[in-house]
Amino acid sequence: MASISSLGIGSGLDLSGLLDQLESAERQKLTPIVAQQNKQQAKISSFGLLDSALDQLNSAVAKLASPDLFSTVKASSSGDAATVTADAEALPGTFQVEVQQLARGYSIATAGVADREADLGAGVITLTLASGDTADIDIDADNSSLEDIRDAINAADAGVSASLVNDGSGSPWRLVLASSETGSEAAIAAVDFGALAGSLSLDAGTEVAARNAELSVNGIAIQSQSNSVADAIQGVTLNLAETGSLELELERDSEKASNAVQGFVNSYNALQKTIGSLSSYNSDTGSAGMLLGNNTLRSIETRLRDGMSTVENSGALGMLSDIGVSLQLDGTLSLDSDRLDEVVAAQPGDLAAFFTGDGENGFANRLADLIDPMVQDGGLIDSATDALDDSIDALGLRYERMEQSIAATVSRYRSQFSQLDSLIATMNSTSSYLTQQFDMMNAQLGRK
């Protein structure tokens, strides 16, 4: 049988077009698989939205679980004598601060040396601080220049820093020794240059005495080794900047607690909106949320609903409604800001007990214990998305097998069409030959 190089050449039929149509029809078998893959991927994306909303709620709950939130005091001050920071230990009150003197460190310089790079000889330099601490610094003869001595003192980390100053004289280079910290206790009490005394000596005229910071708080005299004065007022650090007066007012930061509760309500409502969107169904259009009827989503909804309604706190505030937070029919929360402000102002301790309990039984702690297994690695959402990933992988293998099957079917069609094309070509050739023979016979017989 003659070989046909291109389908349809022998028969005159559009066998290539027919083959394309058959292949297109066969490839329709892939459409349901792709649709299932897309659906599973859409579910994974939906779980991503749910996970994000749960993470935001968990962050809001974590703020409410911190006892420091409800004991926070904010500081306001007038005057430039100091800047103020307050921590969770600070208590409300008003304070008058007078700064009479800032703390400073001790320093003294040596007499001048002509060449800072010239070796001065071997020896041991002994530094003694007012606290009684001493340090012996060995100086090698080959590394005994003023620069080397400076570096050796700094490397010793003995509470003394060394530097070089050029005073512009004939012997300009001076070694300046300064206490690393301010205050009288950190002052340098004595410097013994030992065998180096012939080359180095202190210049008493350059001595700057150490001194402590002196201030008063509400008339109480206070001394500090540092200009950062901690706990002269409970929970407050005064960073002294200059001499002068400062009026300090500490008041409970009720706004911070109120904002945290509002943040919790907003995050919970955002989660409910996400859940509603993912599980919705429109009877008019027949459209449904990607996780409608999903067991994982239903489990999360049930756990959250139980967590929001369970009350084990036996304190003065036992339910969310006691602080102005109420559950609505649509599952969202509503906040009565006036009621919350009253509780924050009048019952900060009870509010802290409601959310934090003893560190385990507070509302925020219990809710966090519910949410963590949902969002943590290997939790509910991870397990659900892992199962969907496995399903997508299985569908991918099914897609590959189906493509192989389609390719085999199309190849079989092509072979059959090629045979058909050749057969029709042969039949056409035979028909033409017979027609010619009959025409010749008719002509010989005188027939038309």
Image: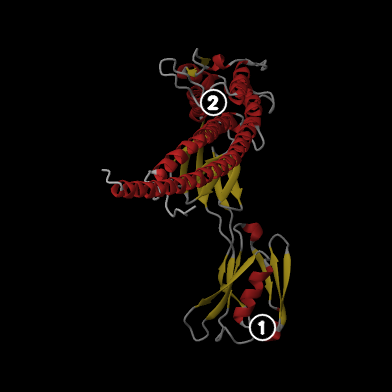
Q: How is the image coloured?
A: secondary structure
| Quarter occupied by residue 66 | top right
- Identify residue for label 2: 291
Q: Residue at x 41, y 15 (%)?
A: 284
Question: Quick one: SS at disc 1?
Answer: helix
Q: What label sits on residue 388 in the rendered view?
A: none
In this view, 117 is above or below 189:
below
The mark closer to the camera, 1 or 2, is 2
Q: Residues within 10 Å of mark 2 (few under 14, many from 20)?
A: many
| Count of number-bearing discs | 2
First in sequence: mark 1 vs mark 2: 1
Which kind of residue does numbered mark 2 sit on?
A: Leu
Residue 234 visible? The answer is: no
Where residue 104 appears, as percent x and y from the top left, is 56, 58
Q: Rate crowding at label 1 as few (under 14), some (14 to 19) or many (20 or more) other CA atoms within 10 Å.
A: some
* Residue drawn at the location 63% of the way across and 21% of the way down: 303
Q: Nearer the viewer, residue 83 or 203?
A: 83
Q: Is residue 225 above or below residue 68?
A: below
Q: Quadrant of the C terminus?
A: top left
Disc 1 to disc 2: CB gap under 8 Å: no
- In the rendered image, which residue does mark 1 sit on? 143
Q: Secondary structure at mark 2?
A: loop
Q: Amino acid at mark 1?
A: Asn
Where residue 310 appears, as percent x and y from the top left, is 64, 16
Residue furthest to the top in view is 329
Q: Which residue is at the far front?
A: 445
